[in-house]
Image: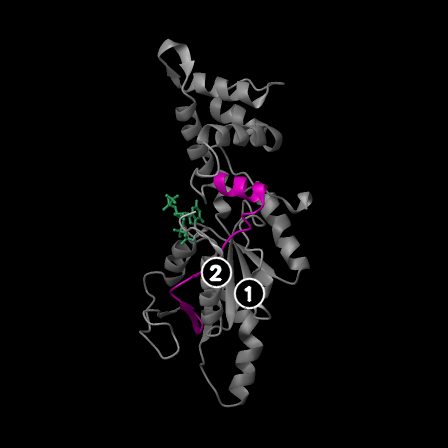
């Protein structure tokens, strides 16, 4: 992770999020749609409390669509609206703005009756590192958006970005930590590149990923690497991929570091295919 999370850091992060939460009406909780559980902060319900919340399933371009639909249902059952988004292309951005306006409609009407008109709806984004918070802020802000300048109540240096329909977004996201005491979570974060190759050596990580893909999407490995996988253990499949890609060093040995980089990089960029690593069916 870009940030080292120690108890002190976690408290500081949580305090900072709590402080900014006081300024907003609604929270956009950003998750990685490939791993909504692993990319979720374990304390999120306590941190957000009763504040209206929208779950944003980001990197939807890298997930398989039927599984995303299952996640939308899963969150709906918890009374939470989840919206699939691609923060890079902007797909789903409009839905976030519409949903926020919709959720705040009653409150705005109540205020209107009291004579308070055009009070902005204020929102902030929270999420673990690398989930796409900065990309989403830029995407939401778009080209036309205006920063409203420093206003009382906002941490020094923070600004509100004006969005459509009376919505204002805090330009600084809240950074939360994942459930890193859980090994499976660590592995998911490593597979997706949220933590950089520090959980284990990249050769083992790539082997674990091949093992996983052989279970959940074997056809994608065949399609991408044109390899034989039939009844083969993951290590042999990895060897086959290495041979196909010419990852061989002098003496005919396999260059595991090189093939590991290829597989991890291609998986993270969605080149192997759109794969959801977590499904509500597994819970
Ligand atoms: P953060 O603020 O939450 O830490 O995340 P940030 O916006 O920096 O995004 C992390 C990486 O994820 C970036 O890749 C960004 O382009 C990518 N990303 C964000 N949203 C999406 C999305 O919807 N789809 C896809 N495919 N990618 C997305 P990067 O700049 O290449 O960084 P890195 O991969 O080198 O860390």
Above or below, 147 relative to 139: below
Q: What residue would you read off at disc 2?
A: 126
Residue 160 x %, y %:
37, 71
Q: Where is residue 81 in the image (x, y as percent from the top left)?
A: 59, 61
Circle 2 — which element?
strand
Q: Give the range drawn in magenta.
A: 164-190
User: Is residue 280 positioned above or below 265 on the image?
Assistant: below
- Furthest-bottom residue in this view: 115
- Give left or right: position of 166 versus 148: right
Q: Residue at x 32, y 75 (%)?
A: 150
Closer to us: 178 or 91: 178
Q: Nearer the viewer, mark 2 or mark 1?
A: 1
Place of residue 220 in the rendered image (x, y in percent of width and height, measured from the top left): 54, 29
Please report whichever mark, 2 or 1, sits nearer to the chain's N-terminal start: 1
- Cα distance in 3D space between marks 2 and 1: 10 Å
> Residue 156 lies in magenta, yes or no?
no
The picture quadrant where one finds residue 259 is: top left
Q: Mark 1 points at which residue?
A: 47
Q: Are marks 2 and 1 in contact (CB under 8 Å)?
A: yes
Q: Does the magenta stretch include residue 179?
A: yes
Report the residue at 59% width, 65% height from top: 46
**Residue, x 55% and y 46% (percent of image)?**
35
């Amino acid at each position: 992770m870009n940030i080292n999370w120690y108890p002190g850091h976690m408290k500081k992060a949580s305090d900072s999020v709590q402080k900014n939460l006081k300024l907003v009406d609604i929270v956009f909780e950003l998750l990685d749609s490939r791993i909504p559980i692993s990319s979720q902060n374990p304390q999120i319900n306590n941190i957000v409390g009763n504040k209206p919340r929208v779950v944003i399933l980001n990197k939807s371009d890298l997930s398989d669509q039927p599984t995303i639909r299952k996640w939308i249902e899963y969150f709906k059952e918890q009374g939470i609206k989840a919206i699939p988004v691609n923060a890079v292309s902007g797909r789903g951005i409009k839905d976030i703005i519409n949903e926020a306006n919709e959720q705040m409609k009653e409150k705005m009407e109540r205020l209107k009756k009291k004579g308070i008109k055009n009070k902005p709806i204020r929102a902030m984004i929270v999420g673990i590192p690398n989930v796409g918070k900065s990309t989403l802020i830029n995407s939401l802000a778009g080209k036309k958006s205006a920063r409203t300048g420093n206003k009382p109540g906002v941490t020094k240096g923070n600004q509100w970005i004006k969005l459509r329909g009376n919505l204002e977004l805090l330009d600084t996201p809240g950074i939360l930590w994942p459930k890193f005491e859980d090994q499976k979570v660590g592995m998911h974060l490593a597979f997706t590149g949220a933590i950089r190759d520090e959980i284990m050596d990249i050769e083992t990580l790539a082997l674990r990923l091949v093992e996983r893909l052989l279970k959940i999407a074997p056809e994608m490995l065949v399609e991408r690497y044109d390899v034989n996988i039939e009844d083969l253990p993951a290590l042999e499949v990895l060897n086959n991929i290495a041979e196909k890609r010419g990852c061989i060093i002098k003496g005919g040995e396999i260059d595991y570091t090189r093939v590991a980089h290829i597989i991890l990089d291609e998986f993270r960029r969605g080149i192997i295919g759109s794969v959801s690593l977590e499904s509500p069916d597994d819970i």
